Image (cartoon, rainbow, N blue to C red):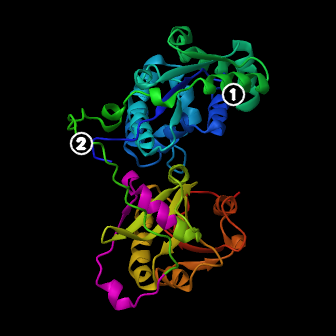
Amino acid sequence: MTKWQVTNLYLIGLIGTLGSGKSTVRKMLEQLGARGIDADALAHVVMQRGSAPWRAIVDTFGADILLPSGRIDRRKLSARVFADAAALRQLEAIVHPAVGALTKELLRETRQPVAVVEAIKLVEAGMHQWCDALWAVTCAPEVQIARVLQTRNLREEDARARLAAQGAYASNLRLAQVIIDNNGDESATRAQVEKAWRAIHPASARDKSAWLLGVEPPPEPAAAPAVETPRAPLPPVETLAQPSAPVAAKRDIQVRRSRRADLDALSAAIAKHDQRAEPLSRDEALKRLGERGYRIAVADNHIVGLAAWEAENLVACVRELWAESVADGAIALPRLFELIENEARELLCEVVLLLIDAGAPDYIVEQAQASNYELLSPGTLQPVWRQVVQERLQPGDRIWGKRLTTELRTKPF
């Protein structure tokens, strides 16, 4: 396809307030063949530590909304904004544009004829204008409260406050073409969803090229049919090569934080680490990015090494250490270690712990030793460190550690 074209699709906008069951309806649509996108899950991705929205949120609401790991304490942030309408508007002004941009990116990659975007504030964000149909899920308030109390760790007054903060839903209901009553059991809801699904005509979908690409496409020549150019394939997942050291030494290897633009290449590199036959799906790669921070080594616009790390209670844990070859590892791994150590110091971490699985190539351990990491046993760790590690340790993992400070800020139990 040309730069002005995307594969068109029939887009359902799915709205509903807290506890109404809109996620249940989205999952039913996915089972019927739709591509589902959960805007709340994307908010987790765009708010990951170090991102532009993360920095804007910290600048706006203060560093006290952060966990010791540097991640945003969503519970604390939610309590603050749902009690203050102005603060909620500030947060939405930061998060909604980033979620909208990522949503459009995922829709551009979608090949299913029907897609559904689930979002509480879909209408307020103006996305409903590009939907071919707006579906609304309704439920009695007391049923919603009961569901929220059952599935979320919230007090009743907090649940009611959140519902109140989500605005006047009645005005949005008047815009909906399909209303799903979710007061009954799952079978009753499924019957409504399947009936509405059978009424969909994907061929009637509006052209969304201008919206998804962010530009007005130029007029196409009348006699020239649109020709779809195949997308460039992801790099194949291959068995680790073992090129000679002199070849790799000639390459300029740089290390840096991974970016969303790296997603396709990163999914292929992670698959190589995991010894998978195919790259990760885009959704799975986004989920991994939302859970941990990836640092990558790049040479000739190609990922030749990676490490995933996260910090909690002043402990930096590093997993998924990988390099494309022994020679690349000799250059990339020490630089990745140094990058992570510098970032960990900025977060006041006391120690960096490498969790290296028993099947890792020998050169991973060799580079850890060369970078002054020592083999440790769980029993020798400070109690706070041990608690963090035990939550992440997999059977067969070996722990290699490096102290970043001689003075401990955490206290033994």
Decide: is 376 above or below 404.
Answer: below
Q: Secondary structure at mark 2?
A: loop
Residue 365 visible at all: yes
Of residues 278 and 324, which is closer to you in this image?
Answer: 278
* Residue 231 pos. (x, y %): 38, 55
Q: CA distance from mark 2 to mark 1?
A: 58 Å
Residue in the image at 54% along x and 17% along y: 165
Decide: is 322 above or below 114.
Answer: below
* Residue 106 pos. (x, y %): 45, 43
Q: Which of label 2 and label 1 is nearer to you?
A: 2
Of residues 263 and 57, which is closer to you in this image?
Answer: 263
Residue type at mark 2? Ala
**Residue sitting at the far front:** 223
User: In this rendering, would 151 be left or right of 318?
Assistant: right
Residue 39 visible at all: no
Decide: is 160 above or below 285.
Answer: above
The crowd level at tag 1 (other Cα within 10 Å; few <14, some 14-19, many 20+) is: some
User: In this rendering, would 387 be left or right of 293?
Assistant: right
Of residues 21 and 8, which is closer to you in this image?
Answer: 8
Looking at the rendering, the stretch of residues picked out in magenta corresponds to 241-270
Residue in the image at 31% along x and 38% along y: 213
* Residue 87 pos. (x, y %): 44, 23
Residue in the image at 49% along x and 19% along y: 84
The image quadrant where one finds the C terminus is bottom right
Disc 2 marks which residue?
224
Q: Is residue 243 magenta?
A: yes
- Residue 242 shows which numbered tag? none
Figure quadrant of residue 36? top right
Q: Is residue 56 magenta?
A: no
Residue type at mark 1? Leu
Disc 1 marks which residue?
154
